[in-house]
Image (cartoon, coloured by chain):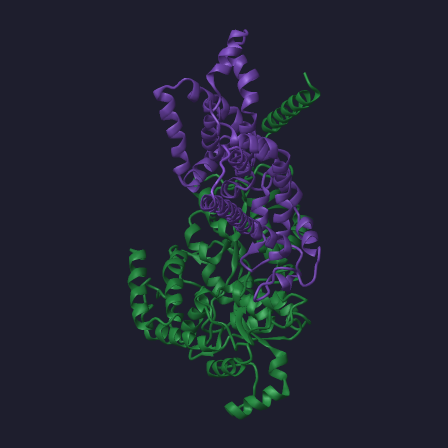
């Protein structure tokens, strides 16, 4: 586009009648410009190609493990342990899915995972949104200390709080319940949620709220009617992170659940026993377990992209 | 308000309401389990490693019929089970009434479980392998009833051993008939013989310690610690065992340092190795579509100067002191003993009573049982040292040392270093 503009501009330059040598001289810069243009275009093509290569590499790096898992779930038992391993199944079978889904407790564990992840996500958002709003809008020292302290909790190894949490939950009669596990999961997702939401609130100009206040909104009304709709993309991103943190969490689920609230990650791990590893069934259940997250991400794709770019352009 | 906004709001309110409702009811989808440890209930919660669940399913059904005690199983992966047990035992608030414990955990949890001496009648003691009776007795009390046990035996490729050309070639080269090995010299020769054309005679597992320790037992030495907990890992038996163990690496796939149970089992099931020393249950778990399915023979663990020796791998049913449901729990443990042979029909296919194994030993498909019985009854067979630091010793000293040894490290130096490290751990 710019090249075209420049060409037009050159074409509009005052006309001169060049002498023979001068005409010769005049063609030289235009050739140089032509060469420059070609060089620029070649450079752009190169950059684009490099970007595509990088993107493709990233896609392969991220996608291959999942594809391998998916292919393994369709392999026969002997194929899953082939030495050297094969990518595609030599013989396709659904036997692993039948085994995995037919195993006692799998459906219940799915329901438990959904319950736990939803409760934990809701808890995280309900706590993180007002906390982050307060921190960003009332820039106080205690707010700054609080947000740093929230981050510190992420630095503690989960096992260090897992065992005391399990003991506490047992002592208040919440042992082996989804609510106990959700609370435990909230301790993981809440700090990240507060940080994420803080950055999203930072991106919202104060003028918007002031305008809402002028129109008669209370502070809470402005938050509910103006700010939250603006940061809804950010909320979606935060919700996804909180949901995933709970959906995939293993250690707390291992320590705090038994019969009534065991979640699927523990059931998936149960395919590895002291006496062998049932790769086929394990990958089949893992593949099925990833479907809701993929669907959720696709459903909220627009919001996620909007959330990720929120605040990228300020002013 | 647009319909889209309305839908969003309704969805949000619905989601919140559901969450609150679920939170309020605090119920999960696993079923209405009775409160664990509640007094006098006829339901027991049984904590079991995922691989062992199938072993006890038949028992549980029978137990319900016979005694009215029903069981809820809490399955956990092996790697996480120790943490869970530690957490619950230390809190004094347990969510289970019966726990199946790996034998290596017995010393760690001996103070958290109840004696079950009344279940160890004279008749029972006669029907349980001697090494297991000894291990179950801690400080003069029996604290765990063996639910199933295992031991390493020799699995070999019957088809290759019976091949006429292999037989002739072997006899020409070594001067004796090709057959399942009964001495370690034979094992070495056969391993060397089959290491050709992309195949290997055996595997060497740098990632696990029990095979090397079996050699130590076969030489008549206690493994790692003597009865006074003195570290004897640097004695001649340990060194000879380590040197022999490493010597097999030339007939095994490369990368021995990383080979563990899963890798060795894969290699054998893929037809890459002609022999393996492996836990007996693997005989019945060879996939039907494996190139070696139906072509595998089983033989007892090979004897050394002290006789046949192996390290058994039993699991014990224990009753926590913290349970309020002791009677029902003990009834379940007794059922597990009474109907022990039902475990053999499960996918794992193991038991703990001698009579249970003997009942099946002549049946087709259970050819591994005779070698297993012989190995478990071996004069040199012994359980692991009864120290709560054992798992730590294995993970931080023995396995790293073996990995260095199979990679070419000097055995005497490595054993001397290991001795110091273990002494430091035991201080």
Q: Position of residue A44 (x, y in %)?
A: 51, 45
The residue located at (61%, 81%) in the rendering is B160
Looking at the image, which is closer to me, B257 or B77?
B257
- Does residue B372 show up? yes
Position of residue A282 relative to residue B383, above or below, is above
Q: Position of residue B237 (x, y in %)?
A: 36, 74
Chain that appears green:
B
Q: Position of residue B104 (x, y in %)?
A: 45, 57
Q: Quadrant of the C terminus of chain B?
A: bottom left
Q: Position of residue B298 (x, y in %)?
A: 59, 75
Looking at the image, which is closer to me, B66 or B407?
B407
- Does residue B382 show up? no
Task: Point out the residue furthest to the front here.
Answer: A19
In the image, B413: left or right of B345? left
Looking at the image, which is closer to me, A25 or B285?
A25
Position of residue B313 relative to residue B114, above or below, is below
Colour of chain A as rendered:
purple
Residue B137 lies in what quarter of the image?
Answer: bottom left
């Amino acid at each position: 586009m710019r090249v075209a503009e420049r060409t037009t501009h050159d074409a509009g330059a005052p006309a001169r009648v060049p002498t023979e040598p001068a005409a010769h001289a005049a063609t030289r810069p235009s050739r140089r410009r032509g060469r420059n243009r070609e060089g620029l275009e070649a450079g752009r093509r190169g950059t684009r190609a490099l970007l595509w290569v990088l993107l493709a590499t990233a896609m392969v790096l991220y996608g291959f493990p999942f594809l391998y898992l998916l292919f393994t779930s369709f392999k026969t038992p002997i194929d899953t342990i082939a030495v050297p391993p094969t990518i595609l199944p030599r013989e396709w079978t659904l036997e692993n899915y039948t085994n995995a889904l037919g195993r006692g407790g799998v459906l219940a564990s799915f329901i438990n995972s959904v319950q736990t992840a939803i409760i934990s996500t809701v808890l995280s958002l309900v706590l993180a949104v007002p906390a982050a709003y307060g921190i960003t809008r009332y820039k106080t020292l205690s707010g700054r200390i609080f947000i740093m302290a929230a981050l510190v909790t992420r630095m503690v190894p989960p096992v260090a709080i897992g065992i005391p949490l399990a003991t506490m939950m047992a002592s208040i009669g919440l042992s082996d319940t989804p609510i106990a596990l959700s609370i435990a999961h909230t301790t993981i997702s809440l700090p990240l949620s507060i940080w994420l939401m803080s950055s999203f609130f930072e991106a919202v100009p104060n003028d918007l709220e002031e305008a809402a206040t002028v129109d008669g909104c209370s502070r809470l009304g402005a938050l509910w009617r103006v700010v939250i709709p603006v940061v809804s993309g950010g909320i979606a991103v935060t919700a996804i992170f909180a949901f995933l943190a709970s959906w995939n969490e293993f250690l707390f689920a291992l320590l705090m659940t038994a019969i009534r609230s065991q979640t699927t990650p523990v059931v998936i791990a149960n395919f590895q026993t002291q006496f062998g590893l049932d790769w086929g069934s394990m990958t089949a259940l893992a593949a099925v377990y990833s479907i809701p997250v993929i669907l959720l991400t696709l459903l909220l794709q627009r919001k996620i992209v909007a959330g990720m770019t929120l605040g990228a352009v300020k002013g | 308000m647009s319909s889209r906004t309305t839908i969003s709001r309704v969805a949000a309110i619905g989601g919140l309401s559901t969450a609150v409702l679920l939170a309020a009811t605090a119920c999960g989808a696993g079923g209405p389990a009775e409160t664990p440890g509640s007094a006098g209930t006829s339901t027991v919660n049984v904590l079991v490693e995922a691989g062992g669940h199938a072993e006890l399913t038949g028992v549980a059904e029978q137990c319900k019929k016979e005694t009215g005690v029903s069981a809820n199983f809490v399955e956990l992966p092996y790697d996480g089970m120790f943490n869970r047990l530690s957490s619950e035992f230390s809190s004094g608030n347990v969510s289970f009434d019966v726990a199946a414990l790996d034998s290596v955990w017995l010393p760690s949890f001996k103070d958290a479980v109840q004696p079950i001496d009344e279940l160890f009648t004279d008749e029972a003691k006669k029907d349980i392998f001697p090494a297991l009776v000894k291990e179950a007795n801690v400080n003069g009390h029996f604290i765990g009833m063996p639910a199933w046990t295992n031991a390493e035996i020799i699995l070999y490729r019957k088809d290759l051993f019976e091949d006429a050309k292999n037989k002739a070639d072997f006899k020409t080269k070594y001067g004796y008939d090709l057959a399942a090995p009964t001495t370690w010299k034979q094992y070495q020769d056969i391993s060397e013989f089959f290491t050709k054309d992309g195949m290997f005679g055996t595997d060497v597992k740098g990632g696990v310690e029990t095979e090397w320790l079996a050699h130590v037992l076969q030489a008549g030495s206690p493994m790692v610690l003597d009865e006074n907990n003195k570290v004897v890992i640097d004695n001649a038996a340990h060194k000879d065992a380590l040197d022999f163990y490493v010597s097999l690496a030339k007939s095994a796939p490369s990368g021995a340092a990383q080979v563990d149970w899963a890798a060795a089992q894969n290699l054998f099931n893929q037809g890459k190795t002609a022999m393996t020393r492996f836990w007996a249950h693997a005989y019945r778990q060879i996939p039907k579509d494996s190139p070696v399915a139906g072509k595998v023979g089983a033989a007892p663990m090979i004897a050394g100067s002290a006789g046949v020796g192996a390290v058994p791998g039993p699991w014990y049913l224990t009753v926590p002191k913290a349970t309020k449901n002791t009677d029902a729990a003990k009834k379940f443990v007794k059922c597990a003993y009474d109907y022990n042979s039902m475990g053999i029909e499960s996918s794992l296919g193991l038991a703990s009573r001698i009579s249970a194994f003997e009942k099946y030993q002549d049946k087709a498909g259970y050819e591994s049982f005779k070698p297993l019985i012989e190995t478990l009854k071996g004069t040199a067979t012994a359980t692991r040292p009864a120290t709560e630091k054992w798992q730590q010793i294995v993970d931080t000293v023995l396995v790293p040392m073996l990995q260095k040894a199979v990679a070419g490290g000097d055995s005497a130096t490595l054993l001397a270093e290991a001795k110091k490290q273990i002494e430091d751990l035991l201080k």
